[in-house]
């Protein structure tokens, strides 16, 4: 379709970078304002409201993506998400590691990318270490581990969730409405959360239909942070040798959008590490998220929001593993004596600032 748009000086891959930049900027601004983050939804002090925001976004992502599939604009039948050999060990270990890491760093990687644009140097440090670890797991020294773990697979009859997509859309929409009604979250925030979710089908349709060019093809993709972060670090280090891609544009857009929203709303604050122990904890979490995101097939946005929207069985399992890892690490931190004592409870960790 791209060749019909009349562009003469911009190729489809080049247009994809600009499209990703715009998509990321909108996500960065909306995510900053709404506090969009799965960690907050699972273990945050405001988890009821944060859970409603995240689930409304998920419901909108699934509804929008499946509507685009029903319209015949895009399809996932031949996509790698729908492989019938399920890498169960990689998904399980990767999801658990990513979930544990995002609790250690007090934010999933999408949230920390947003906070990096708002002046949080802790988040920026995590983003860089996350990207380097993801790159090492994809193509570097940790690649043999990825290959070995990923080779453990089980065959499945269908790579997509059973039943009609309309049923899943209806169930998610109903659950989102119930959670929203009980959360106490303000209606404007929930509307913005739905807009975050609709960015997912916008990404799929933009790369899979609007920018489709048989002579210069690009991959169909949407919001994600694991591979894009790795690509961005590689691009920064070797920009004269490799061109920017969709992922590079996406990460740059998120940083720019978050920065703009932070300055506009007065939320920009320089923040840094407080103690060496905190630094070590964040670095450990970044490493776990980087390797875990690659093994699981994505982060809470890539494997969660975007990939679950395709109704992929692997994505649902990855999201469940991430949630399990987060809850397990949260309980483990609560059991540490120094942590429990500072909270005044043996079972409840101390209240912590958002990220």
Image (cartoon, rainbow, N blue to C red):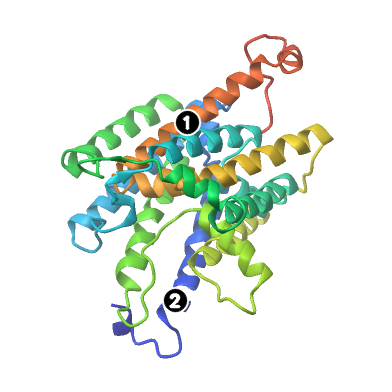
Residue drawn at (65%, 54%), measured in percent from left and top?
A: 132
Q: In the image, 167: left or right of 225?
A: left
Judge the density around disc 1: few (<14), some (14-19), many (≥20) Cα neighbours within 10 Å.
many
Tell me if I can see residue 355 in this picture: no
Residue drawn at (50%, 54%), measured in percent from left and top?
A: 27
Q: Residue furthest left?
A: 164
Q: Where is residue 126 in the image (x, y as percent from the top left)?
A: 68, 46
Residue drawn at (73%, 18%), measured in percent from left and top?
A: 339
Q: In the image, 19: left or right of 83?
A: right
Label 1, label 2: how many angstroms apart (C-alpha)? 35 Å
Judge the density around disc 2: few (<14), some (14-19), many (≥20) Cα neighbours within 10 Å.
many
* SS at circle 2: helix
Q: Quadrant of the C terminus?
A: top right
Q: Position of residue 32 (x, y in %)?
A: 58, 47
Nearest the viewer among 217 and 35 is 217
Nearest the viewer among 259 and 125 is 125
**Image: 237 above or below 93:** below
Residue drawn at (49%, 72%), measured in percent from left and top?
A: 18
Q: Where is residue 214 in the image (x, y as percent from the top left)?
A: 30, 79
Q: Position of residue 3 (x, y in %)?
A: 31, 84
Nearest the viewer among 275 and 287 is 287
Q: Which residue lies furthest to the right in this view?
A: 275
Nearest the viewer among 8 and 48 is 8
Residue holding disc 1 = 323
Tally of numbered tags: 2
Q: Residue furthest bottom?
A: 8
Tag 1 and tag 2, C-beta contact below 8 Å: no
Residue holding disc 2 = 13
The image quarter containing residue 273 is: top right
Q: In the image, 219: left or right of 32?
A: left
Q: Quadrant of the N terminus?
A: bottom left
Label located before the other in sequence (1 or 2): 2
């Amino acid at each position: 379709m791209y060749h019909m748009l009349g562009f003469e000086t911009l190729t489809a891959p080049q247009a994809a970078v600009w499209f990703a930049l715009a998509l990321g900027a909108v996500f960065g601004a909306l995510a900053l304002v709404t506090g969009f983050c799965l960690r907050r939804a699972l273990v945050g002090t405001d988890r009821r409201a944060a859970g409603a925001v995240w689930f409304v976004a998920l419901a909108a992502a699934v509804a929008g993506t499946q509507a685009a599939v029903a319209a015949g604009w895009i399809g996932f039948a031949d996509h790698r998400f729908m492989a019938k050999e399920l890498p169960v060990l990689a998904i399980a270990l990767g999801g658990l590691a990513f979930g544990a890491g995002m609790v250690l760093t007090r934010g999933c990687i999408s949230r920390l990318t947003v906070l990096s644009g708002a002046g949080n140097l802790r988040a920026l440090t995590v983003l860089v270490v996350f990207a380097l670890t993801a790159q090492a797991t994809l193509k570097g020294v940790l690649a043999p581990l990825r290959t070995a773990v990923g080779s453990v697979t089980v065959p499945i009859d269908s790579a997509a969730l059973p039943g009609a997509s309309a049923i899943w859309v209806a169930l998610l929409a109903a659950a989102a409405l119930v959670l929203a009604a009980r959360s106490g979250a303000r209606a404007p925030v929930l509307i913005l959360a739905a807009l975050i979710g609709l960015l997912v089908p916008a990404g799929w349709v933009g790369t899979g239909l609007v920018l489709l060019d048989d002579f210069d093809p690009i991959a169909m993709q949407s919001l994600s942070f694991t591979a894009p972060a790795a690509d961005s670090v590689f691009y920064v280090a070797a920009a004269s040798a490799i061109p920017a891609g969709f992922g590079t544009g996406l990460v740059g857009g998120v940083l720019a959008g978050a920065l703009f929203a932070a300055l506009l709303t007065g939320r920009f604050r320089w923040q840094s590490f407080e103690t060496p122990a905190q630094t070590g904890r964040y670095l450990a979490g970044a490493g776990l998220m980087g390797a875990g995101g690659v093994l699981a097939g994505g982060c809470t946005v890539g494997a969660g929001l975007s990939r679950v929207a395709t109704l992929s069985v692997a994505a649902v399992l990855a999201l469940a593993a991430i949630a399990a890892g987060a809850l397990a690490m949260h309980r483990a931190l609560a059991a540490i004596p120094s942590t429990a004592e500072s909270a005044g409870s043996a079972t409840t960790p101390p209240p912590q600032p958002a990220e």
